[in-house]
Image: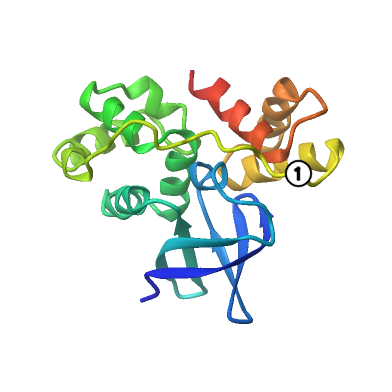
């Protein structure tokens, strides 16, 4: 099992990133809660990781915080929740917000995450009720790091739409969400963050 990687951030295309570790490029999928705080391309970063082995692929998931990985792993143990849905949950809310939704049995908020209907939200609340306390959710998980400079406005919007689709939103919905918050001067990460925030509020 690959538990941690430290290397140079070679590329960022939410929700995927490429990490160069000693000349080997690791393709990693990460939630937006990790992307918001990543350094610029070319800088070094350490990620805690979780490897999911499927019949057709080995997929590596990376997180900046141990708490996010712990929540991801805990979500994978919930009936009917796979890695894609767990990634979508962590992209839509941090561990503290998720814990609050579970404690308050906020089915409406959980149902706003793509792929989660009322029944899945109820199952999440029921199965995660005893686990959220163990995760030790604390405030300030998403620090609001400055977005990295890079793609132009059109590229940023296209990349943001692609990331939202990868997180489970329908293409038409992803396009509408991204365009609703895009002012033409934001990075893809900023557009995604604003779109997800608007959806979850």
Does residue 52 appear in the picture of this structure? no
Local packing at callout 1 (Cα closer than 10 Å; few below 14, some 14-19, many 20+) is few
Q: Tell me which corner region of the image, top left, top right, bottom left or bottom right, holds residue 43.
A: bottom right
Q: Tell me which corner region of the image, top left, top right, bottom left or bottom right, holds residue 121.
A: top left
Q: How many marks?
A: 1
Q: From the viewer's perspective, is 173 left or right of 33? A: right
Is 41 located above or below residue 133 in the figure?
Answer: below
**Residue located farthest toward the bottom when viewing the structure as drawn:** 23
Q: From the viewer's perspective, is 171 left or right of 141? A: right
- How far across and down, in percent of the image, does residue 38 sit? 57, 50
Residue at image position (63%, 81%) is 23
**Residue located farthest toward the left when viewing the structure as drawn:** 130
Residue at image position (50%, 36%) is 114
Q: From the viewer's perspective, is 165 left or right of 78? A: right
Question: Which of 187/98 is in front?
Answer: 187
| Quadrant of the image containing the N terminus | bottom left
Does residue 66 appear in the picture of this structure? yes
Residue at image position (40%, 74%) is 2
- Residue bearing the label numbered 1: 149
- How far across and down, in percent of the image, does residue 8 sit? 61, 67
- How far across and down, in percent of the image, does residue 49 sit? 41, 64
Question: Which of 28/52 is in front?
Answer: 28
């Amino acid at each position: 099992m690959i538990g941690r990687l430290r290397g140079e951030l070679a590329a960022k295309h939410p929700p995927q990133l490429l990490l160069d570790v000693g000349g080997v490029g690791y393709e990693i999928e990460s939630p937006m809660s990790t992307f918001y705080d990543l350094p610029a391309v070319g800088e070094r970063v350490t990620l805690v990781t979780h490897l999911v082995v499927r019949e057709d692929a080995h997929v590596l998931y990376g997180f900046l915080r141990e708490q996010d990985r712990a929540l991801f792993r805990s979500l994978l143990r919930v009936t009917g929740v796979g890695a894609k849905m767990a990634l979508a949950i962590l992209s839509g809310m941090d561990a503290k917000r998720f814990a609050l939704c579970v404690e308050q049995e906020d089915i409406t908020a959980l149902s706003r995450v793509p792929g989660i209907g009322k029944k899945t939200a109820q199952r999440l609340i029921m199965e995660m009720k005893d686990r959220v306390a163990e995760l030790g959710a604390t405030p300030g998980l998403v620090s609001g790091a400055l977005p990295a400079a890079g793609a132009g406005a059109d590229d940023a919007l296209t990349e943001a739409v692609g990331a939202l689709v990868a997180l489970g939103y329908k293409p038409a919905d992803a396009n509408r969400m991204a365009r609703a918050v895009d002012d033409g001067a934001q990075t893809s990460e900023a557009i995604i963050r604003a779109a997800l925030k608007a959806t979850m509020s």
